Image (cartoon, coloured by chain):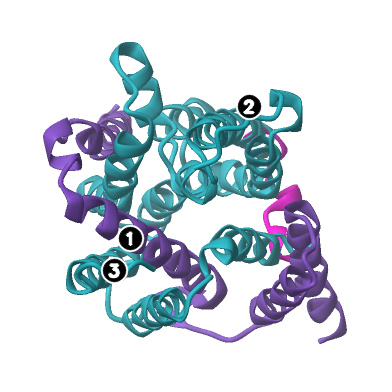
Chain colours: A purple, B cyan
Amino acid sequence: MSLWFWVLAACAAVYATKLLGYLVPQSWLKHPAVGRVSAMLTIGLLAALVAMNTFSAEQSVTIDARLGALLAAAVALLLRAPFILVVLVGAAAAAGIRALG
Amino acid sequence: MSTSPPVPLRRSPALRTGLSIAAAISLYGVSFGALSTAAGMTLWQTVALSALLFSGASQFAFIGILASGGTGAAALGAATLLSGRNTIYAVQMKALLNPRGFKRLAAAQVTIDESAAVAMSAPDPVEQRRGFWGAGIACYLFWNLATVLGALLGDVIAEPEALGLDGAVVAAFLGLLWPRLKSLDAWALAVLAALVTTVTMPLLAPGVPVLAAAVVAVVWGLASKGVRA
């Protein structure tokens, strides 16, 4: 029963973190600096997600097959491949490197 | 901004992007289901985490801490901290989509890395809306189905890495970032944000480095007054 309490409390807490952002007053979002910061934030967040998913290990940083996937995906993007192909290239590169290594 | 009519929903690039990213993450849902039951959660507790909490990194942290003997309070704290970036996504999504009433409550539930990333990388308001809801709903359905499968099947596919699924996720986020890297300024910020994330990963709790990168981006945005990226 106690475990259920923590499960449901965590669900409520995480939902609150999501809802919180939608409760920011609309007037704050109209400030001119917000548009500029928002564009930079988008780039920063996406780049952070790329880095986190490429190098993360349990509480440390590692270089493994995912870096190969990143490079292969970059090549696919340079060649103007569509999104789904880029994703498949990333998967194939990581799986291929692991199969070989 | 283009005034041409939007493409039909069936051919929406943002919707397709959302569906492919949902497919890419779904095996992680199987993995979560398997690991959650292995960590001592019941089937229904596992289902509750995917249906109600619905934020991959927070879910893995929650069961990971319990599995390694941590307290329920520690698991709750880590899951909540990890979801801090969802708050930032939510502010961004409010600025882009401004959902109201019930839609706002539903939007909050599907505000995660994937839905926010697809919406942020879409070129116009129609595609942003389709990208957010398409990715959000598809991820929600796939993730929950996958969780049940994983919880019932056990460890059959507990390691999506063998299939290169982790590489697919890396490629997906790079694919979403790519169209934004059109200026030297954008490249410089992206590299800096990636560096900050990587350098702080061993120091901060999982997921928090993304918040550090967000702070850097905000400062960058405030400092580059008047300069368009």
The residue where tag 1 is placed is A41
Q: Residues within 10 Å of mark 1 (few under 14, many from 20)?
A: many
Q: Is residue B108 left or right of residue B27?
A: left
Q: Identify the residue position indicated by label 3 in the image.
A: B217
Kindly identify the amino acid type of the residue bearing the numbered disc 1.
Leu
Establish whether labels 1 and 3 are both on one chain: no
Closer to us: B189 or A35: A35
**B214, B49: nearer the viewer:** B214
Residue farthest to the front, as pictured: B3
Report how far apart the C-alphas of labels 1 and 3 lie in the structure: 5 Å
Q: Are marks 1 and 3 in contact (CB under 8 Å)?
A: yes
Position of residue A29 in the picture relative to residue B38 (left or right):
left
**Residue B42 percent across, percent down from the top left:** 49, 32
Three-letter residue code for mark 3: Ala
Q: Can you say which quadrant of the picture contains the C terminus of chain A?
A: bottom right
Instruction: Confirm whether the magenta stretch covers residue B105.
Output: no
Q: Viewed as shown, does residue B129 lie left or right of B31?
A: left
* Residue B42 at least partly seen: no
Q: Amino acid at mark 2?
A: Pro
Q: Secondary structure at mark 3?
A: helix
Q: In this picture, which residue range is highlighted in magenta?
A: B151-162
Q: Nearer the viewer, mark 2 or mark 3?
A: 2
